[in-house]
Image (cartoon, helix red, strand yellow):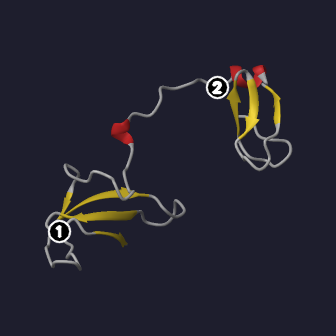
Amino acid sequence: MQFCDECGSMMVSVDGEMTCRDDACGATSERDEELAARFESTEEQTDDEVIETVEGAEFEGKPTATDVVCDGCGHDEAWYTIKQTASADEPPTRFFKCKECSSRWRGYN
């Protein structure tokens, strides 16, 4: 991994040149081939591993929670996904979608 000398952000390889990920900075530098040789590339993440938490996300088929009550309709079943939204020492956030009225909310532990 290579970091920007200007702002410290992580750099990415674009056409054989390292470019700062911070659009405001935009610094570029030569790729450090010796550094790159020490790391192994892995396969890209598949969509199966992505946790959808945006408005258009498909919750159907995700795990079901029965320990919640929807504020919209009072139904006691909802699909949910889990995402780490705070630091690693904090519990993850659960995002819910009511099976009855499709209302969405988040739950903090």
Q: Residue at x 77, y 50 (%)?
A: 24
Spot occupied by residue 31 in the image (x, y as percentages of width and height): 78, 25
Query: Does 86 appear above or below 3?
Result: below
Spot occupied by residue 10 in the image (x, y as percentages of width and height): 71, 42
Residue under label 1, please give it. Answer: 101
Camera-side residue: 103 or 81? Answer: 103
Q: CA distance from mark 1 to mark 2?
A: 48 Å
Q: Is residue 57 left or right of residue 2?
A: left
Query: Does 39 appear above or below 28?
Result: above
Residue under label 2, please give it. Answer: 39
Q: Residue at x 37, y 41 (%)?
A: 49
Residue 83 occupies quadrant: bottom left
Q: Is residue 58 left or right of residue 4?
A: left
Spot occupied by residue 43 in the image (x, y as percentages of width and height): 47, 26
Dot 2 surroundings within 10 Å: few (below 14), some, or many (20 or more)? few
Spot occupied by residue 2 in the image (x, y as percentages of width and height): 74, 35
Camera-side residue: 99 or 88? Answer: 99
Q: Residue at x 36, y 51 (%)?
A: 52
Camera-side residue: 98 or 39? Answer: 98
Q: Is residue 83 left or right of residue 3?
A: left
What amino acid is at disc 1? Cys
* Secondary structure state at the residue bearing disc 2: loop
The first of marks 1 and 2 along the sequence is 2
